[in-house]
Amino acid sequence: MPAPTSAPTDITGLAEAVLTTASDAIIATDRDGVITFWNPGATRIFGFTHEEATGQSLDIIIPENLRARHWDGYHRTMATGESRYGEADLLAVPGLRKDGSRVSVAFTIVMLKDAQGHMSGTAAILRDVTRQFEELRELRRQLADARAG
């Protein structure tokens, strides 16, 4: 039986590998919702380059009809340090691509705090689940048609 392999000991190399992945989007914001980190995965999913996204409001990826609800929750969380979502919650929402099309994303979010423990922003890992969402919607439609007919 082969000996177990050990995890990488170079945490900097591990962090760089994770943060620069192109498979999932990793986005960080400050307490005002301004994008401070945007990885290649975010570019692949949303279409904005790092240069285009960094320094912009999250509004660039939030559909207009969902912005008020998003910002109400975001500002409440920044003010209170409490979110209605738990650390293990996987959230699913529509997002907005640079070309104006929508994308379905599933994501987890982490609250960032400064040295004094005050809210300083968020970090999120997002995955494009558009294909799965569309397949599920089609299956539901087919099931409803079968029940009706």
Image (cartoon, rainbow, N blue to C red):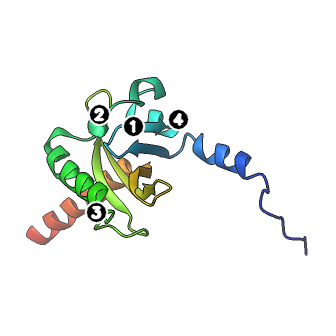
Q: Quadrant of the C terminus?
A: bottom left
Question: Which is nearer the eye, 53 or 132?
Answer: 53
Instruction: Say which of marks 4 and 2 sits in front.
Output: 2
**Which residue is pictured at 15% across the width and 66% down the height?**
144
Q: Where's residue 76, x and y in %?
A: 23, 58
Residue 35 has which mark? 1
| Amino acid type, residue under disc 2 in the picture | Ile
Type of the residue with mark 1: Ile
Q: Name the amino acid type tagged 4.
A: Pro
The disc placed on residue 80 is 3
The residue beneath circle 4 is 40
Question: What residue sits right under mark 2 in the picture?
Answer: 60
Q: CA distance from mark 2 to mark 1?
A: 10 Å
The residue at 26%/41% (across/down) is 62
Looking at the image, is mark 4 or mark 1 earlier in the sequence?
1
Residues at circles 2 and 1 in contact by the CB criterion of under 8 Å = yes
- Cβ–Cβ below 8 Å for labels 4 and 1? no
State the image coordinates of residue 38 (x, y, percent, origin top left): 47, 37
